[in-house]
Image (cartoon, helix red, strand yellow):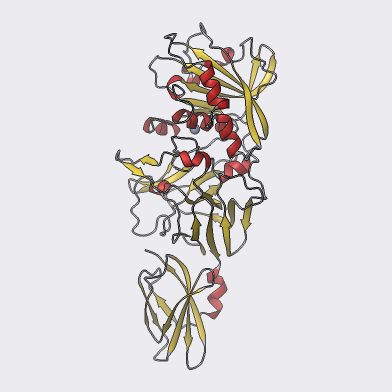
Amino acid sequence: MIQKAILVLAFLLCTFFLASQEVNDPVIGSQQLAIVPFDYALDSSHQSIADIDTGFFVSPFSIKKFIEEVSYGKATIEGQVYDYRINQPPLFGQGYTNCFPIDDVIANQPDVDYSIIDNIVLMVHDTVSKSCAAGNSSFGRLPFTTSDGSFNFRRSGFRTQFYTPHEFSGISNSTVAHELLHSFGISYHSNSYIMKDGEFDIQAYGNLFDIMGLRSQASHPCALIKEQKGWLTDNEIRRVQGSDTLRIFPLEKTLPGQTQCVVIDLPNELDLQPNDELRFSKIYIEYRGLTGFDQRSIRRVQLNDGSNYTIDDPHGALIYGIDCQLNDDFCLPVLLDMHPEPMGGIGTSYLPHEASDAQLLINESYSVPNMDLNIEVINVVPGEYIEVVIDMGLVSAVEDTHLSDLQVYPNPAHDVIHVSGMGDTEIQTQIYNANGKLVLTGHNSRRIDISVLRPGTYLVEVIDSSTGKKSVQKIVVSR
Ligand SMILES: [Zn+2]
Protein backbone atom coordinates (compact mmCIF):
# COMPACT_ATOMS: atom_id res chain seq x y z
CA MET A 1 0.00 0.00 0.00
CA ILE A 2 2.81 2.37 0.82
CA GLN A 3 4.55 1.69 -2.46
CA LYS A 4 1.32 2.41 -4.29
CA ALA A 5 0.95 5.69 -2.48
CA ILE A 6 4.45 6.68 -3.47
CA LEU A 7 3.68 6.09 -7.10
CA VAL A 8 0.48 8.09 -6.93
CA LEU A 9 1.61 11.04 -4.89
CA ALA A 10 4.30 13.22 -6.25
CA PHE A 11 4.86 15.58 -3.40
CA LEU A 12 4.75 13.84 -0.06
CA LEU A 13 6.71 10.74 -0.65
CA CYS A 14 7.71 8.61 2.18
CA THR A 15 9.16 5.25 2.94
CA PHE A 16 10.04 3.82 6.27
CA PHE A 17 11.31 0.73 7.92
CA LEU A 18 10.26 -0.99 11.06
CA ALA A 19 11.64 -0.67 14.51
CA SER A 20 10.10 -2.10 17.62
CA GLN A 21 10.93 0.71 20.00
CA GLU A 22 9.04 3.88 20.83
CA VAL A 23 5.86 3.07 18.96
CA ASN A 24 3.12 4.68 21.06
CA ASP A 25 5.65 6.01 23.59
CA PRO A 26 5.61 9.68 24.62
CA VAL A 27 8.12 12.12 23.15
CA ILE A 28 8.59 14.88 25.69
CA GLY A 29 11.28 17.53 26.15
CA SER A 30 14.22 18.50 24.00
CA GLN A 31 15.14 16.18 21.16
CA GLN A 32 18.77 16.50 20.11
CA LEU A 33 19.27 16.39 16.34
CA ALA A 34 22.47 15.86 14.36
CA ILE A 35 21.67 17.19 10.88
CA VAL A 36 24.28 15.82 8.52
CA PRO A 37 24.28 16.94 4.87
CA PHE A 38 25.82 14.76 2.16
CA ASP A 39 26.78 16.06 -1.27
CA TYR A 40 26.99 13.33 -3.88
CA ALA A 41 26.52 15.66 -6.84
CA LEU A 42 29.28 18.21 -6.33
CA ASP A 43 27.55 20.53 -8.78
CA SER A 44 27.77 23.65 -6.59
CA SER A 45 24.00 23.71 -6.17
CA HIS A 46 23.52 22.31 -2.70
CA GLN A 47 21.60 24.28 -0.14
CA SER A 48 23.71 26.31 2.23
CA ILE A 49 24.28 25.19 5.80
CA ALA A 50 22.82 28.52 6.95
CA ASP A 51 19.61 27.91 4.98
CA ILE A 52 19.20 24.43 6.43
CA ASP A 53 19.81 25.83 9.91
CA THR A 54 17.21 28.55 9.27
CA GLY A 55 14.71 25.99 8.07
CA PHE A 56 15.13 23.77 11.07
CA PHE A 57 15.62 26.25 13.89
CA VAL A 58 15.19 29.94 13.01
CA SER A 59 12.43 30.64 10.48
CA PRO A 60 8.96 31.65 11.73
CA PHE A 61 7.85 28.40 10.08
CA SER A 62 10.79 26.34 11.19
CA ILE A 63 10.60 22.68 12.06
CA LYS A 64 11.37 23.67 15.65
CA LYS A 65 8.35 26.01 15.74
CA PHE A 66 6.23 23.28 14.21
CA ILE A 67 7.21 20.67 16.79
CA GLU A 68 6.64 23.17 19.59
CA GLU A 69 3.22 24.15 18.27
CA VAL A 70 1.92 20.63 17.68
CA SER A 71 3.24 19.42 21.06
CA TYR A 72 1.88 22.47 22.94
CA GLY A 73 5.43 23.25 23.99
CA LYS A 74 5.97 19.81 25.49
CA ALA A 75 8.60 18.82 22.93
CA THR A 76 11.19 20.80 21.02
CA ILE A 77 14.22 20.15 18.85
CA GLU A 78 17.78 21.35 19.29
CA GLY A 79 21.01 20.50 17.63
CA GLN A 80 23.37 21.46 14.91
CA VAL A 81 23.77 21.33 11.16
CA TYR A 82 27.15 19.85 10.28
CA ASP A 83 29.24 20.64 7.20
CA TYR A 84 28.61 18.81 3.95
CA ARG A 85 30.15 15.39 3.65
CA ILE A 86 31.82 14.68 0.31
CA ASN A 87 33.73 11.70 -1.04
CA GLN A 88 31.50 9.30 0.87
CA PRO A 89 30.86 5.74 -0.33
CA PRO A 90 28.46 5.76 -3.29
CA LEU A 91 24.74 5.28 -2.79
CA PHE A 92 24.30 1.72 -3.96
CA GLY A 93 22.73 -0.97 -1.86
CA GLN A 94 19.48 -2.44 -0.76
CA GLY A 95 16.28 -0.74 0.34
CA TYR A 96 16.72 2.71 1.77
CA THR A 97 20.46 2.54 1.31
CA ASN A 98 19.80 2.89 -2.39
CA CYS A 99 19.02 6.54 -1.85
CA PHE A 100 20.55 7.31 1.53
CA PRO A 101 23.88 6.61 3.23
CA ILE A 102 24.27 3.15 4.70
CA ASP A 103 24.39 2.56 8.44
CA ASP A 104 28.19 2.24 8.54
CA VAL A 105 28.46 5.72 7.05
CA ILE A 106 25.76 7.13 9.31
CA ALA A 107 27.44 5.77 12.41
CA ASN A 108 31.01 6.78 11.65
CA GLN A 109 31.11 10.54 11.25
CA PRO A 110 33.97 11.58 13.55
CA ASP A 111 32.63 15.05 14.37
CA VAL A 112 29.20 13.79 15.51
CA ASP A 113 28.79 13.04 19.21
CA TYR A 114 26.54 10.01 19.04
CA SER A 115 26.25 9.77 22.79
CA ILE A 116 23.99 12.82 23.01
CA ILE A 117 21.75 12.61 19.97
CA ASP A 118 18.14 11.48 19.74
CA ASN A 119 17.88 11.80 15.96
CA ILE A 120 20.23 11.74 13.04
CA VAL A 121 18.88 13.64 10.03
CA LEU A 122 20.51 12.98 6.67
CA MET A 123 20.20 15.67 4.00
CA VAL A 124 21.18 14.12 0.69
CA HIS A 125 22.11 16.35 -2.24
CA ASP A 126 22.15 14.07 -5.24
CA THR A 127 21.31 14.72 -8.86
CA VAL A 128 21.33 11.09 -9.85
CA SER A 129 17.93 10.17 -11.18
CA LYS A 130 16.52 7.29 -9.18
CA SER A 131 13.08 6.44 -7.95
CA CYS A 132 13.83 7.53 -4.43
CA ALA A 133 11.40 8.62 -1.76
CA ALA A 134 11.72 12.25 -0.76
CA GLY A 135 12.14 11.19 2.81
CA ASN A 136 12.21 8.15 4.99
CA SER A 137 12.45 7.42 8.66
CA SER A 138 12.74 4.76 11.28
CA PHE A 139 9.85 4.13 13.61
CA GLY A 140 11.50 5.12 16.83
CA ARG A 141 15.09 4.39 17.78
CA LEU A 142 17.37 1.94 16.02
CA PRO A 143 20.56 0.41 17.43
CA PHE A 144 23.74 1.76 15.83
CA THR A 145 27.32 0.70 16.45
CA THR A 146 29.12 4.01 16.20
CA SER A 147 32.67 5.23 16.53
CA ASP A 148 31.69 6.34 20.09
CA GLY A 149 30.07 3.04 21.09
CA SER A 150 26.62 1.51 20.75
CA PHE A 151 23.65 3.87 20.88
CA ASN A 152 20.01 3.89 19.95
CA PHE A 153 18.81 6.87 18.00
CA ARG A 154 16.20 7.74 15.41
CA ARG A 155 17.00 8.17 11.77
CA SER A 156 15.45 10.32 9.03
CA GLY A 157 16.66 11.09 5.55
CA PHE A 158 15.70 13.67 2.92
CA ARG A 159 16.58 13.94 -0.74
CA THR A 160 17.74 17.15 -2.41
CA GLN A 161 14.67 18.18 -4.34
CA PHE A 162 12.54 18.14 -1.27
CA TYR A 163 14.51 20.45 0.91
CA THR A 164 15.93 22.99 -1.47
CA PRO A 165 15.46 25.81 -2.29
CA HIS A 166 12.53 26.19 0.13
CA GLU A 167 12.81 28.02 3.39
CA PHE A 168 10.92 25.11 4.95
CA SER A 169 7.72 26.91 4.23
CA GLY A 170 6.27 24.58 1.65
CA ILE A 171 6.63 20.98 0.60
CA SER A 172 9.91 20.45 2.36
CA ASN A 173 8.48 21.66 5.64
CA SER A 174 5.70 19.12 5.45
CA THR A 175 7.97 16.29 4.40
CA VAL A 176 10.50 16.93 7.15
CA ALA A 177 7.78 17.28 9.79
CA HIS A 178 6.08 14.13 8.51
CA GLU A 179 9.28 12.11 8.67
CA LEU A 180 10.25 13.40 12.10
CA LEU A 181 6.89 12.22 13.40
CA HIS A 182 7.52 8.80 11.85
CA SER A 183 10.87 8.77 13.64
CA PHE A 184 9.08 9.53 16.92
CA GLY A 185 7.39 6.14 16.55
CA ILE A 186 4.36 6.90 14.36
CA SER A 187 4.16 3.95 12.04
CA TYR A 188 1.05 4.83 10.10
CA HIS A 189 -0.53 7.51 8.01
CA SER A 190 -3.94 8.99 8.61
CA ASN A 191 -5.70 6.46 6.58
CA SER A 192 -9.12 7.04 5.17
CA TYR A 193 -11.69 5.10 3.31
CA ILE A 194 -12.38 5.76 -0.31
CA MET A 195 -14.85 4.09 -2.61
CA LYS A 196 -12.90 2.57 -5.45
CA ASP A 197 -14.20 0.29 -8.19
CA GLY A 198 -17.36 -0.19 -6.16
CA GLU A 199 -15.53 -1.27 -3.04
CA PHE A 200 -14.16 0.49 -0.04
CA ASP A 201 -10.44 0.81 0.05
CA ILE A 202 -8.04 2.20 2.62
CA GLN A 203 -6.05 5.17 1.47
CA ALA A 204 -2.64 5.42 3.07
CA TYR A 205 -2.70 9.16 2.71
CA GLY A 206 -6.01 10.89 2.70
CA ASN A 207 -6.69 13.15 5.62
CA LEU A 208 -6.36 16.68 4.36
CA PHE A 209 -6.08 17.94 7.92
CA ASP A 210 -3.27 15.76 9.09
CA ILE A 211 0.48 15.94 8.57
CA MET A 212 0.59 12.16 8.44
CA GLY A 213 -1.88 12.28 5.62
CA LEU A 214 -2.34 14.19 2.42
CA ARG A 215 -0.91 17.62 2.96
CA SER A 216 1.59 19.67 1.09
CA GLN A 217 2.34 22.02 3.94
CA ALA A 218 2.90 21.30 7.57
CA SER A 219 -0.16 20.66 9.66
CA HIS A 220 -0.96 19.04 12.95
CA PRO A 221 -1.05 15.30 13.53
CA CYS A 222 -4.40 13.97 14.67
CA ALA A 223 -5.41 13.79 18.32
CA LEU A 224 -4.65 10.07 18.55
CA ILE A 225 -1.00 10.74 17.68
CA LYS A 226 -0.88 13.66 20.08
CA GLU A 227 -2.30 11.45 22.79
CA GLN A 228 0.26 8.71 22.12
CA LYS A 229 3.13 11.20 22.17
CA GLY A 230 2.00 12.66 25.50
CA TRP A 231 1.18 16.07 24.05
CA LEU A 232 -2.58 15.82 24.55
CA THR A 233 -3.46 14.61 28.04
CA ASP A 234 -6.57 13.50 29.89
CA ASN A 235 -7.10 17.18 30.74
CA GLU A 236 -7.84 17.90 27.07
CA ILE A 237 -9.43 14.58 26.12
CA ARG A 238 -13.10 14.13 26.97
CA ARG A 239 -14.28 10.53 27.18
CA VAL A 240 -18.01 10.26 26.53
CA GLN A 241 -20.18 7.59 28.11
CA GLY A 242 -23.60 8.71 26.90
CA SER A 243 -25.52 11.45 25.15
CA ASP A 244 -23.96 14.84 25.62
CA THR A 245 -23.50 18.29 24.12
CA LEU A 246 -19.88 19.32 23.95
CA ARG A 247 -17.79 22.27 22.90
CA ILE A 248 -14.56 21.23 21.19
CA PHE A 249 -11.71 23.70 20.84
CA PRO A 250 -9.20 23.71 17.96
CA LEU A 251 -6.60 21.00 18.12
CA GLU A 252 -3.98 23.48 16.97
CA LYS A 253 -4.14 25.85 19.93
CA THR A 254 -2.35 25.44 23.24
CA LEU A 255 -5.34 25.27 25.61
CA PRO A 256 -4.51 23.25 28.72
CA GLY A 257 -7.64 21.88 30.36
CA GLN A 258 -9.96 22.66 27.43
CA THR A 259 -11.62 19.87 25.48
CA GLN A 260 -9.71 19.43 22.24
CA CYS A 261 -10.62 15.84 21.57
CA VAL A 262 -13.67 13.71 22.29
CA VAL A 263 -13.35 9.94 22.55
CA ILE A 264 -16.34 7.63 22.36
CA ASP A 265 -15.62 4.12 23.60
CA LEU A 266 -17.82 1.81 21.59
CA PRO A 267 -19.53 -0.96 23.55
CA ASN A 268 -18.30 -3.51 21.05
CA GLU A 269 -15.96 -3.47 18.08
CA LEU A 270 -17.86 -2.06 15.18
CA ASP A 271 -17.72 -3.46 11.68
CA LEU A 272 -18.62 -0.50 9.51
CA GLN A 273 -17.97 -2.16 6.19
CA PRO A 274 -18.27 -5.71 4.97
CA ASN A 275 -15.51 -5.12 2.42
CA ASP A 276 -12.68 -4.63 4.87
CA GLU A 277 -11.26 -6.13 8.03
CA LEU A 278 -11.49 -3.01 10.14
CA ARG A 279 -13.20 -3.17 13.53
CA PHE A 280 -13.50 0.10 15.36
CA SER A 281 -13.29 0.15 19.13
CA LYS A 282 -13.28 3.93 19.55
CA ILE A 283 -14.40 7.01 17.71
CA TYR A 284 -12.42 10.24 17.96
CA ILE A 285 -13.81 13.69 17.27
CA GLU A 286 -11.67 16.79 16.96
CA TYR A 287 -12.08 20.30 15.58
CA ARG A 288 -9.57 21.72 13.15
CA GLY A 289 -9.55 25.49 13.31
CA LEU A 290 -7.87 28.03 11.10
CA THR A 291 -4.90 28.74 13.29
CA GLY A 292 -1.17 28.27 13.37
CA PHE A 293 0.51 26.01 10.85
CA ASP A 294 -2.84 24.62 9.77
CA GLN A 295 -3.87 28.03 8.49
CA ARG A 296 -1.17 27.77 5.87
CA SER A 297 -2.55 24.66 4.31
CA ILE A 298 -2.78 24.26 0.60
CA ARG A 299 -6.49 23.61 0.35
CA ARG A 300 -6.45 21.32 -2.58
CA VAL A 301 -6.23 17.63 -3.22
CA GLN A 302 -5.97 15.79 -6.47
CA LEU A 303 -8.73 13.36 -7.34
CA ASN A 304 -8.17 10.07 -9.09
CA ASP A 305 -9.27 11.55 -12.42
CA GLY A 306 -6.52 14.14 -12.17
CA SER A 307 -8.80 17.05 -11.37
CA ASN A 308 -8.42 19.06 -8.21
CA TYR A 309 -10.84 19.40 -5.38
CA THR A 310 -10.53 22.71 -3.61
CA ILE A 311 -11.37 23.33 0.02
CA ASP A 312 -12.30 26.96 0.46
CA ASP A 313 -13.22 26.69 4.11
CA PRO A 314 -10.73 24.28 5.64
CA HIS A 315 -12.05 23.83 9.10
CA GLY A 316 -14.53 21.54 10.74
CA ALA A 317 -14.97 18.49 12.88
CA LEU A 318 -13.04 15.37 12.03
CA ILE A 319 -14.45 12.01 12.98
CA TYR A 320 -12.31 8.93 12.75
CA GLY A 321 -12.54 5.39 13.95
CA ILE A 322 -9.75 3.55 15.73
CA ASP A 323 -8.97 -0.01 14.72
CA CYS A 324 -6.71 -1.79 17.20
CA GLN A 325 -7.07 -5.37 16.00
CA LEU A 326 -5.32 -5.34 12.61
CA ASN A 327 -1.94 -4.68 14.17
CA ASP A 328 -1.08 -5.49 17.76
CA ASP A 329 1.59 -2.79 17.94
CA PHE A 330 -0.51 0.20 17.17
CA CYS A 331 -4.05 1.36 16.66
CA LEU A 332 -4.91 2.65 13.23
CA PRO A 333 -6.92 5.86 12.81
CA VAL A 334 -9.27 5.70 9.84
CA LEU A 335 -11.13 8.78 8.77
CA LEU A 336 -14.86 8.14 8.63
CA ASP A 337 -17.25 9.73 6.26
CA MET A 338 -18.43 13.03 7.52
CA HIS A 339 -21.44 13.76 5.39
CA PRO A 340 -24.96 13.23 6.67
CA GLU A 341 -25.34 9.80 5.16
CA PRO A 342 -23.53 7.04 6.98
CA MET A 343 -20.55 5.50 5.32
CA GLY A 344 -21.70 2.97 2.80
CA GLY A 345 -25.30 4.07 3.06
CA ILE A 346 -27.69 3.21 0.29
CA GLY A 347 -27.24 5.33 -2.76
CA THR A 348 -23.89 6.77 -1.81
CA SER A 349 -21.75 7.89 -4.68
CA TYR A 350 -18.48 9.01 -3.20
CA LEU A 351 -15.91 10.74 -5.23
CA PRO A 352 -12.48 9.32 -4.65
CA HIS A 353 -11.10 11.20 -1.66
CA GLU A 354 -14.50 12.54 -0.75
CA ALA A 355 -14.39 11.08 2.72
CA SER A 356 -11.09 12.76 3.38
CA ASP A 357 -12.07 16.06 1.87
CA ALA A 358 -15.28 16.51 3.72
CA GLN A 359 -15.30 18.53 6.87
CA LEU A 360 -18.21 18.31 9.22
CA LEU A 361 -19.76 21.71 9.66
CA ILE A 362 -22.93 23.13 11.08
CA ASN A 363 -26.11 21.25 10.19
CA GLU A 364 -24.19 18.12 9.32
CA SER A 365 -24.22 14.90 11.23
CA TYR A 366 -22.62 11.52 11.22
CA SER A 367 -24.61 8.45 12.13
CA VAL A 368 -22.95 5.17 12.95
CA PRO A 369 -24.79 2.51 11.04
CA ASN A 370 -26.35 -0.32 13.00
CA MET A 371 -25.65 1.45 16.22
CA ASP A 372 -27.64 4.04 18.02
CA LEU A 373 -25.04 6.77 17.74
CA ASN A 374 -25.37 10.10 16.01
CA ILE A 375 -22.96 13.01 16.09
CA GLU A 376 -24.34 16.35 14.98
CA VAL A 377 -22.65 19.72 14.69
CA ILE A 378 -24.95 22.40 16.08
CA ASN A 379 -22.69 25.43 16.30
CA VAL A 380 -19.42 26.60 14.81
CA VAL A 381 -17.40 29.68 15.65
CA PRO A 382 -14.67 29.45 13.00
CA GLY A 383 -11.24 29.03 14.49
CA GLU A 384 -12.65 29.24 18.03
CA TYR A 385 -14.76 26.17 18.73
CA ILE A 386 -17.36 23.77 17.47
CA GLU A 387 -20.33 22.38 19.37
CA VAL A 388 -21.55 18.86 18.81
CA VAL A 389 -24.45 16.85 20.09
CA ILE A 390 -23.65 13.23 20.71
CA ASP A 391 -26.78 11.14 20.80
CA MET A 392 -26.38 7.62 22.11
CA GLY A 393 -28.83 4.94 23.07
CA LEU A 394 -32.11 6.64 22.23
CA VAL A 395 -33.72 3.47 20.94
CA SER A 396 -33.32 1.50 24.11
CA ALA A 397 -34.48 4.47 26.15
CA VAL A 398 -37.75 4.92 24.30
CA GLU A 399 -38.72 1.42 23.31
CA ASP A 400 -40.82 0.93 26.41
CA THR A 401 -43.07 3.83 25.55
CA HIS A 402 -43.45 2.89 21.92
CA LEU A 403 -47.08 1.87 21.59
CA SER A 404 -47.50 -1.04 19.28
CA ASP A 405 -49.89 0.63 16.85
CA LEU A 406 -47.93 3.80 16.11
CA GLN A 407 -46.01 3.90 12.88
CA VAL A 408 -43.88 6.80 11.73
CA TYR A 409 -42.46 6.33 8.26
CA PRO A 410 -40.39 6.37 6.16
CA ASN A 411 -37.34 5.87 8.33
CA PRO A 412 -34.85 7.17 7.40
CA ALA A 413 -36.99 10.10 6.39
CA HIS A 414 -36.26 12.90 3.96
CA ASP A 415 -38.83 15.67 3.58
CA VAL A 416 -42.09 14.21 4.85
CA ILE A 417 -43.13 11.72 7.52
CA HIS A 418 -46.42 9.93 7.87
CA VAL A 419 -48.07 8.96 11.12
CA SER A 420 -50.39 5.98 11.14
CA GLY A 421 -51.86 3.38 13.44
CA MET A 422 -53.66 5.91 15.65
CA GLY A 423 -57.12 5.54 14.09
CA ASP A 424 -59.14 8.70 13.59
CA THR A 425 -58.43 10.15 16.97
CA GLU A 426 -57.21 13.70 17.24
CA ILE A 427 -53.43 13.75 17.71
CA GLN A 428 -50.68 16.18 18.56
CA THR A 429 -47.21 15.52 17.20
CA GLN A 430 -44.04 16.89 18.75
CA ILE A 431 -40.59 16.30 17.27
CA TYR A 432 -37.51 16.59 19.45
CA ASN A 433 -33.90 16.71 18.34
CA ALA A 434 -31.17 14.55 19.84
CA ASN A 435 -30.55 17.19 22.46
CA GLY A 436 -34.13 16.98 23.68
CA LYS A 437 -35.17 20.32 22.21
CA LEU A 438 -38.64 20.64 20.70
CA VAL A 439 -38.09 21.53 17.05
CA LEU A 440 -41.41 20.91 15.31
CA THR A 441 -45.07 20.47 16.25
CA GLY A 442 -48.07 19.23 14.30
CA HIS A 443 -51.78 19.43 15.10
CA ASN A 444 -53.96 16.55 13.99
CA SER A 445 -51.86 15.92 10.94
CA ARG A 446 -50.92 12.49 9.61
CA ARG A 447 -48.50 13.99 7.11
CA ILE A 448 -45.81 16.25 8.49
CA ASP A 449 -43.39 18.32 6.44
CA ILE A 450 -39.95 17.88 8.00
CA SER A 451 -37.92 19.55 5.27
CA VAL A 452 -36.81 22.21 7.76
CA LEU A 453 -35.09 19.62 9.95
CA ARG A 454 -31.37 19.13 9.65
CA PRO A 455 -30.11 15.62 9.06
CA GLY A 456 -29.83 13.76 12.32
CA THR A 457 -31.71 11.70 14.85
CA TYR A 458 -35.09 12.83 16.16
CA LEU A 459 -37.79 11.63 18.49
CA VAL A 460 -41.34 11.84 17.22
CA GLU A 461 -43.80 12.00 20.09
CA VAL A 462 -47.47 11.43 19.20
CA ILE A 463 -50.11 12.29 21.78
CA ASP A 464 -53.67 11.01 21.64
CA SER A 465 -55.63 14.19 22.45
CA SER A 466 -58.60 12.33 23.89
CA THR A 467 -56.70 10.06 26.25
CA GLY A 468 -53.44 12.00 26.69
CA LYS A 469 -51.58 8.80 25.96
CA LYS A 470 -48.14 9.33 24.41
CA SER A 471 -46.03 7.17 22.19
CA VAL A 472 -42.60 7.87 20.83
CA GLN A 473 -40.64 6.69 17.87
CA LYS A 474 -37.14 7.51 16.79
CA ILE A 475 -36.46 8.55 13.22
CA VAL A 476 -33.34 9.45 11.33
CA VAL A 477 -33.55 12.35 8.91
CA SER A 478 -31.14 12.09 6.04
CA ARG A 479 -30.75 13.77 2.68
ZN1 LIG B 1 5.03 8.59 5.76
Q: Is residue 337 above or below residue 132?
A: below
Residue displayed at 41% across by 38% down: 298
Q: Quadrant of residue 181?
A: top right
What is the total number of numbered labels drawn onto the structure image? 0
Give the position of the N terminus as an image quadrant.
top left
Q: Residue 371 location, x and y as percent?
A: 51, 62
Is 7 or 226 nearer to us in this picture?
A: 226
Report x, y in % for residue 174.
48, 32
The answer to whether one can see residue 21 in this image is no
Q: Where residue 244 sits in the image (x, y, percent)?
A: 58, 64
Q: Is residue 260 left or right of residue 361?
A: right
The correct choice, above or below, for 319 with respect to 464 in the image is: above
Please tell me which residue is depicted at 40% across the width and 59% down the height of the picture. 341
Front residue of this view, candidates 98 and 273: 98
Depth order, front residue of 433/43: 43
Residue in view at x 65 percent, y 41 percent: 230
State whether residue 120 appears in this view: yes
The answer to whether 48 appears left or right of 29 in the picture is left
Could you tell me residue 365's position as x and y percent?
Answer: 46, 60
Q: Which quadrant would the C terminus be assigned to in this image?
A: bottom left
